[in-house]
Amino acid sequence: MNLFSPPSLDDLIRLLRAWKFWVLAAIIGAVIGAAVYYVARPPFRARATVVVDFNLEQAWPQETDRQQFYYLERETRKLEELALSDEVMKKISSESGFGIEDLRGGKLELSQPAEGGWHFYATDKDAAAAQQLASAWANAFAERAKVQIRTSDGLNSFIEVTVTQSESLPVWPNVSLSSYLFIGAVGFASLAALFFLFFSKPK
């Protein structure tokens, strides 16, 4: 088969007839993927949870839906900025030993900010360190938010912030074993198919 020629029906037939060859390659790839997973473990991810209640009925009892929407959007944006603020990052950095640049560069991730549960994710090669980092972030955020709510320093006084999960946090590998198996199987099966088409001589 010419490398630059379009595939023909005969090429497809040859490839399908060699299904045992690329299935075996897929199995070998999956085994190698599993080996890589256990030898070079991916980082762990932990999750802490803070419940944010905007108390919309008390904050805007007589207002329209549009005004309430803008209220939620504005206060949510303020809380998001607070979660990644210098003050909160400095507190976490002093407790964990990680630099602020590292914390903002991928170690911390805030998910689904809205009314209800806010999830604070932390990633680290050590599972216990990831748990401590997520817990420290959630507590530092809640502590600073309560100060601003109590003093009316930027946040509406009707907002309530409560840490609901900061101990014995759920933690799991950032990349699952199934992803390694899938990538290994698909990668080796593809390589096997290409090898068979370009380098195997047709009978």
Image: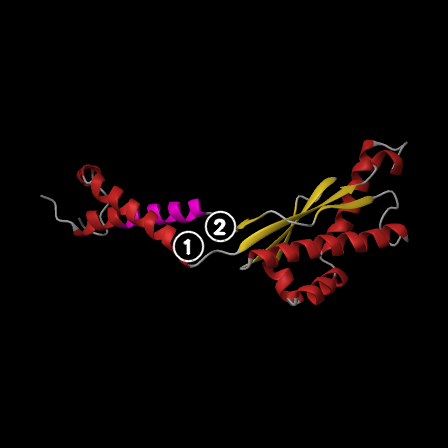
Residue 7 vs residue 154: left or right?
A: left
Mark closer to the observer (2, 1) = 1
Q: Residue at x 71, y 41 (%)?
A: 117
Tell me the quarter of the picture where residue 26 sits. Answer: top left
State whether the magenta stretch is mostly helix, strand or loop.
helix
Q: How many marks?
A: 2
Q: Residue at x 88, y 38 (%)?
A: 59
Identify residue type, mark 1: Tyr
Identify residue type, mark 2: Val
- Magenta-drawn segment: 177-191
State yes or no: residue 178 in magenta.
yes
Q: Residue at x 83, y 36 (%)?
A: 56
Label 1 crowd bin: few (<14), some (14–19), many (20+), radius 10 Å: few
Q: Which residue is mark 1?
A: 38
Residue 72 vs residue 40: left or right?
A: right
Residue 105 vs residue 166: left or right?
A: left
Label 2 crowd bin: few (<14), some (14–19), many (20+), radius 10 Å: some
Q: Position of residue 72 (x, y in %)?
A: 78, 41
Which label number is shown at residue 152?
none
Q: Which residue is mark 2?
A: 175
Tell me the quarter of the picture where residue 7 sits. Answer: top left
